Image (cartoon, rainbow, N blue to C red):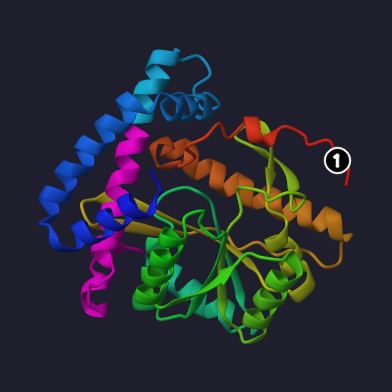
């Protein structure tokens, strides 16, 4: 459903419709998706089995409906947040002063900050939080969308948020762009829980083997920039909780691969703890665990 027509209609519609109408349409869309998109429904249920291995398929598929509903609400609330004034945007987020101060303290080290997250919660709203609440510039590393119309619209959305986009292309060019931002003591945000080809590092996640993206930890090792896990969770209509995790230092006094794996595992542990607490906010709409099988060249 992530095509130009549907995505554009959602973006434009939420921008003009009353909130309750948007939520009602979201509930109807959730029900239709859950009923009609069987492969998606069973894929979500299979993903959740790692959290509830003794539950039946039927129970896990009912849980999948909660995930679809949570995602619909997150999309609606994020779109509604885009055009809020800075003063109003602050009212959208629950956060501790210590969490906001953490960004300031890490930036004082002068090495930039690599903000890492997963496909969990409202990670897009994290850009609103950084730009309008914490008052820090951020560049978002992202894969290009398959649909050019969706890709253009997502760039427009990031511009409204005040975030730059680093689109993943050749791995060397992407790494250089990230390093340039960090050299300017900026924040670079990247999702780490899906690997891309051989850009991977082995971790234990939710009790299972998984491949996470290696690049964030590798660049942290090379530059000394800290990895800062960050999670944004919906706590009510138009309300989010922004949670900073424990900063992760990629130890440069250890062998490179060992240091990278340890850092990736530290992030996997923090993400796993959030997913266990709120599994309905874990957004993978394909069979995530099937994608973690060892590839033929896993030793590379």
Q: Nearer the viewer, residue 42 or 128?
A: 42
Q: Which residue is mark 1?
A: 297
Q: Magenta stretch: dominant SS?
A: helix
Quadrant showing the N terminus? top left
Q: Position of residue 73 (x, y in %)?
A: 27, 47
Is 43 colored magenta in this rendering? no
In magenta, the rendered stretch is 66-95
Quarter of the rendering containing residue 82: bottom left
Q: Nearer the viewer, residue 127 or 39?
A: 39
Q: Seen in the image, is 247 located left or right of residue 146?
A: right
Which residue is at a point 52% across and 58% down the rendered structure image? 245
Q: In this picture, is 71 found above or below 39?
A: below
* CA neighbours of label 1 inside 10 A, class few (<14), some (14 to 19), many (20+): few
Which residue is at a point 47% across and 80% down the rendered structure image? 137
Q: Nearer the viewer, residue 38 or 75?
A: 38
Q: Position of residue 208 (x, y in %)?
A: 66, 31
């Amino acid at each position: 459903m992530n095509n130009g027509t549907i995505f554009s209609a959602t973006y434009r519609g939420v921008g003009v419709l009353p909130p309750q109408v948007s939520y009602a349409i979201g509930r109807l869309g959730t029900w239709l998706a859950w009923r009609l998109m069987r492969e998606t429904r069973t894929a979500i249920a299979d993903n959740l089995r790692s959290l509830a291995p003794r539950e039946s398929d039927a129970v896990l598929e009912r849980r999948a409906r909660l995930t679809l509903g949570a995602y619909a609400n997150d999309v609606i609330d994020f779109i509604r947040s885009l055009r809020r004034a800075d003063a109003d945007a602050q009212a959208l987020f629950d956060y501790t002063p210590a969490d906001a101060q953490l960004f300031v303290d890490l930036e004082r080290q002068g090495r930039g900050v690599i903000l890492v997250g997963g496909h969990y919660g409202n990670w897009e709203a994290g850009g609103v939080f950084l730009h309008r609440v914490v008052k820090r510039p951020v560049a978002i590393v992202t894969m290009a969308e398959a649909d050019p119309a969706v890709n253009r619209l997502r760039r427009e959305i990031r511009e409204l948020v005040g975030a730059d986009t680093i689109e993943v292309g050749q791995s060397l060019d992407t790494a250089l762009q990230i390093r340039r931002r960090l050299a300017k003591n900026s924040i670079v945000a990247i999702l780490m829980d899906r690997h891309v080809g051989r850009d991977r590092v082995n971790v234990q996640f939710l009790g299972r083997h998984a491949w996470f993206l290696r690049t964030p930890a590798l660049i942290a090792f090379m530059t000394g920039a800290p990895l800062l896990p960050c999670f944004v969770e919906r706590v009510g209509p138009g309300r989010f909780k922004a949670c900073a995790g424990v900063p992760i230092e990629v130890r440069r006094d250890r062998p490179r691969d060992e240091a990278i794996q340890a850092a990736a595992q530290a992030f996997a542990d923090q993400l796993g703890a959030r997913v266990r607490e709120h599994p309905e906010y874990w957004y993978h709409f394909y069979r995530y665990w099937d994608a973690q099988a060892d590839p033929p060249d896993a030793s590379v």
